[in-house]
Image (spheres, rainbow, N blue to C red):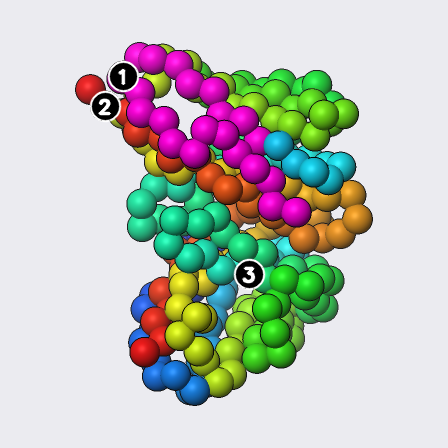
Amino acid sequence: QQPVQSPQAVILREGEDAVINCSSSKALYSVHWYRQKHGEAPVFLMILLKGGEQKGHDKISASFNEKKQQSSLYLTASQLSYSGTYFCGTEIMTGNQFYFGTGTSLTVIP
Amino acid sequence: GAGVSQTPSNKVTEKGKYVELRCDPISGHTALYWYRQSLGQGPEFLIYFQGTGAADDSGLPNDRFFAVRPEGSVSTLKIQRTERGDSAVYLCASSPLRGSSYNEQFFGPGTRLTVL
């Protein structure tokens, strides 16, 4: 039931864009996105609640296709501070469990 | 205000011993989650509390793991007869209202458990 993320890892130069995908085999209530830096706790980025909903947060935005059970996180004009591991998190229809995805390691270099 | 706190930050124990890990959620948060994170992996769901009751404990790996939240605030994760495979960072998160669908989770710094 763990969502699958792709790519597993990506290296960007400052200013470049990236897309991280999250796919679930179960129907979803919502998708969350978190970023975790090495040795730190995950930090919330955004929640998406409806099919097709998009949200933006500075230069980070996301979309959620409820029918396809997929979400994508878009990072534009990446900054060094964007480096970390990104996790999607999902709550399925039938329970209170919350599942984090497999993770995507993102490294932004100067 | 204060965030989620967890104690101890590090715990080293021997195989077979009993350990307790404590989580102090943000005041007023009714939802509380425990996760376990191994190196290079995402957090793995263990248990979810809504108030004092365990609304979902399906993620607890076996009966050596148990968690309580007697007054709807502080929670304690208890692990009996620890095994080396229990070594991980144990994360606690709280959320202001019922259900993660509508509210972000605020994470504590975690407790790093090492079983020798």
Mark 1 on the same chain as mark 2: yes
- Residue at image mark 3: B34
Q: Is the C-beta separation of discs 1 and 2 under 8 Å?
A: yes
Label for residue A109?
A: 2
Asked whether B105 or A14 is in front, the reply is A14
In the rendered structure, the residue with mark 2 lies on which chain? A
Give the residues drawn in magenta, as a range.
Answer: A1-22
Q: Secondary structure at mark 3?
A: strand
Instruction: Indicate yes or no whether the magenta region holds residue A11.
Output: yes
Residue B90: x and y in percent read: 45, 62
In the rendered structure, the residue with mark 3 lies on which chain? B
In the rendered structure, the residue with mark 1 lies on which chain? A
Say which amino acid is labelled 3: Trp
First of labels 1, 2 by sequence position: 1
Q: Secondary structure at mark 2?
A: strand
Q: Is the C-beta separation of discs 1 and 3 under 8 Å?
A: no
Asked whether A28 or B92 is in front, the reply is A28
Name the quadrant containing residue A43: top left
Can residue A33 be seen from the camera position used here?
no
Q: Residue at x 54, y 41 (%)?
A: A101
Label for residue B108?
A: none
- Residue at image mark 1: A14
